[in-house]
Amino acid sequence: MDNLYDVIIIGSGPAGLAAGLYAARARMKTLILEKDKTGGQIVSTDEVANYPGSIQHATGPSLIARMVEQAEGFGAERKKDAVISVDFSEKIKTVTCRNEEYKAKAVIIAAGARPKKIGCPGEDKLVGKGVSYCATCDADFFTDLEVFVIGGGDSAVEEAMYLTKFARKVTIVHRRDELRAAKSIQEKAFANDKLHFLWNTTVNEIKGEGIVESIVFENLKTGEISEHAADEDDGTFGVFPFIGYDPLSELFKGKVEMNKAGYIITDADMKTDVSGVFAAGDIREKSLRQVATAVADGAIAAVQAEKYIESIG
Ligand code: NAP
């Protein structure tokens, strides 16, 4: 059976690619399935400063390109085919994709997470028309314009700093009066003249016909509602929400154990509650979601998958 693999890895971010590298290097017939783009969220990152060994302005895309080359070099196969359902009830697992059905002795779920939405009126309608979840992809469109970044964590602050290289003015809109971001990141942000802060504030609505034209804020301390309209000469501005992530685990609901937020529960060996099914990276319940922890998860999952396959003969 051509479509029978030792291991199928769902997702091609750092966790999936590390799993692919380890699995293929262990001479397992390995398939990495990716939905639309290779690399996961790290591809949207301009600078990966905290991945050990990654220095001198390493970018997310360059790191991923090297990971892909390495995994393929060891023989991992990659296919672009979106998974639509999985069946983990038999010894041989089935992964059904839009184009084909694949089977494997073990499956590693490394499907990652996606940016959370604010959920306010206008947000969905204006995605790609001023609202963006990827500074690296879209910063250029906002050259010399104004930009609002929503959130106060590492992502919001780092991406806001990146956006200052393009935008005329970048304002971080945060629902509290202090940032959640790491102190080292905060220090750089407070020293950046182009960065401004709107504290204790949330976004109630984003307005515009075909393009972002105004944004409605609520001050959570005073209850005051205010509307900021685009500068007349500009006609528009950018809105970049970076308010955390949701796991991409819908497909696996009822198939493997998850917590309330939808993150897959594993043990320290990346084993889920189903024999032969492992999870790695951001989709897993864990305390730190970083490239460093994702690749570690991927390596462990692949080694454990190999042991599992040996055990079932
Ligand atoms: P995060 O740490 O969960 O921060 C989310 C931010 O958005 C928080 O400031 C939160 O406010 C705010 N927020 C959440 N829901 C909101 C809502 N509905 N409306 C308005 N604001 C909302 O997410 P993240 O910054 O994306 O980071 C995710 C993980 O990746 C973290 O573990 C982070 O350390 C890691 N990361 C690390 C780096 C790095 O080390 N260089 C870079 C990027 C990400 P509150 O603060 O009030 O909760």
Image: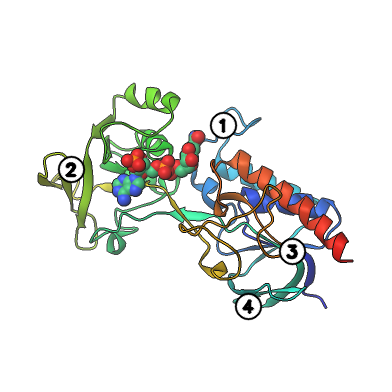
Q: Nearer the viewer, mark 2 or mark 1?
A: 2
Residue that badge 4 annotates: 99
At numbered mark 1, what does the secondary structure look like: helix, strand or loop? Answer: loop
Residue located at (11% from left, 46% from top): 226
Q: Which callout, 2 or 4, points at the residue further toward the start of the chain?
A: 4
Q: Which callout, 1 or 4, points at the residue further toward the start of the chain?
A: 1
Residue that badge 1 annotates: 50
Across and down, in percent, residue 156 comes to: 38, 40
At numbered mark 3, what does the secondary structure look like: helix, strand or loop? Answer: loop
Q: Evaluate if marks 1 and 3 touch, with contact meaning CB atoms under 8 Å apart.
A: no
**Residue 220 numbered tag:** 2
Mark 1 → mark 3, Cα distance in angstroms: 32 Å
Q: Evaluate if marks 2 and 4 touch, with contact meaning CB atoms under 8 Å apart.
A: no
Q: Nearer the viewer, mark 1 or mark 4?
A: 1
Using residue 145 as the reference point, say whether residue 59 is left or right of it.
Answer: right
Q: Is residue 193 visible?
A: yes
Across and down, in percent, residue 15 comes to: 64, 50
Residue type at tag 1 = Asn
Which quadrant does ligand 1 occupy?
top left
Residue type at tag 3 = Gly
Q: Nearer the viewer, mark 2 or mark 4?
A: 2
Q: Which callout, 3 or 4, points at the residue further toward the start of the chain?
A: 4
Mark 2 → mark 1, Cα distance in angstroms: 34 Å
Mark 2 → mark 4, Cα distance in angstroms: 48 Å
Residue that badge 3 annotates: 276
How dense is the environment of label 2, judged by Cα within 10 Å: few (below 14), some, or many (20 and up)? some
Q: Is residue 160 above or below residue 97?
A: above
**Residue 59 numbered tag:** none
Using residue 119 as the reference point, say whether residue 44 is left or right of it.
Answer: right
Q: Is mark 1 within 8 Å of ligand 1?
A: yes
